[in-house]
Amino acid sequence: MSRRTLALAALVAASLPAVALAEGGGGPGESFYVYLVDFLILFVPVAWLVWPRARQALADRHDAMKAELDDARAKFAESEARMKTAEERLSVLNDEMNTVMEEFRRQGQAERDALAHEGVVLSEKIRAEADFRMDQAVKMARADLAEAVVTKAFALVE
């Protein structure tokens, strides 16, 4: 028999004296002791059959819950360890990121300074070249002027 069937049968059997009393009929007896004996006659076999199974079911449930709890604790400890490892890795990555960013800033500063220096050198070169070309142009203009003056002077002398 299944547990439900057995429980239903025990419930029906246990309720028979109450039904008989409610009908007002004779039932098995009208005294308290008769009802007590009826109850014990029904309760003892049911308890004898159901109690060990109920205990076993409760013990199995207890063991299952304990195993689940132990498993949950183990998983929780593992997840805490993984979280701690991840936090450490994140801290290391943040430090590394800050180091890389500082290195990029330093390199950018150095590159900017190098470009600024190169610009100054190039502007000095251009200025020197412009001065040289201006001097050459002035010299050429003086030479042309001197030649024109000499040519005019010779033309006037002749």
Image: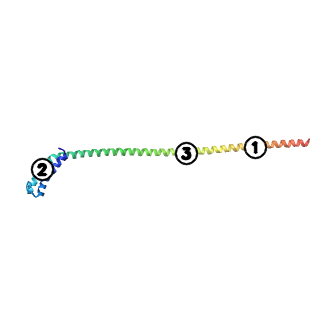
Q: What's the distance in space between the residues labelled 1 and 3, CA to CA? A: 43 Å
Vertical position of residue 60 compared to residue 15: above or below? above
Q: Residues within 10 Å of mark 3 (few under 14, many from 20)?
A: few
Marks 1 and 3, the one that precedes in the sequence = 3
Marks 1 and 2, the one that precedes in the sequence = 2
Please provide percent x and percent y for residue 116.
Answer: 62, 45
Element assignment for label 1: helix
Nearer mark to the viewer, of 1 and 2: 2
Tell whether label 3 touches label 1 (CB within 8 Å): no
Q: What's the distance in space between the residues labelled 2 and 3, CA to CA? A: 92 Å
Q: Residues within 10 Å of mark 1 (few under 14, many from 20)?
A: few
Q: If the image is split into quadrants, where does the C terminus sit?
A: top right
Q: Quadrant of residue 119?
A: top right
Along the viewing direction, whichever of 21 and 119 lies nearer the viewer:
21
Residue shown at the point (71%, 42%) measured from the top left: 129
Tell whether label 2 touches label 1 (CB within 8 Å): no
Residue shown at the point (76%, 43%) measured from the top left: 135
**Circle on res. 42:** 2
Residue shown at the point (89%, 42%) measured from the top left: 155
Going by the numbered disc 2, the residue's amino acid type is Leu
Tell whether label 3 touches label 2 (CB within 8 Å): no
Q: Is residue 47 left or right of residue 88?
A: left
Please provide percent x and percent y for residue 93.
Answer: 46, 44
Q: If the image is split into quadrants, where does the N terminus sit?
A: top left
Q: Which residue is mark 1?
A: 135
Q: Which residue is mark 3?
A: 106
Nearer mark to the viewer, of 2 and 3: 2
Please provide percent x and percent y for residue 125.
Answer: 68, 43
Please provide percent x and percent y for residue 44.
Answer: 12, 49
Element assignment for label 2: helix
Going by the numbered disc 3, the residue's amino acid type is Arg
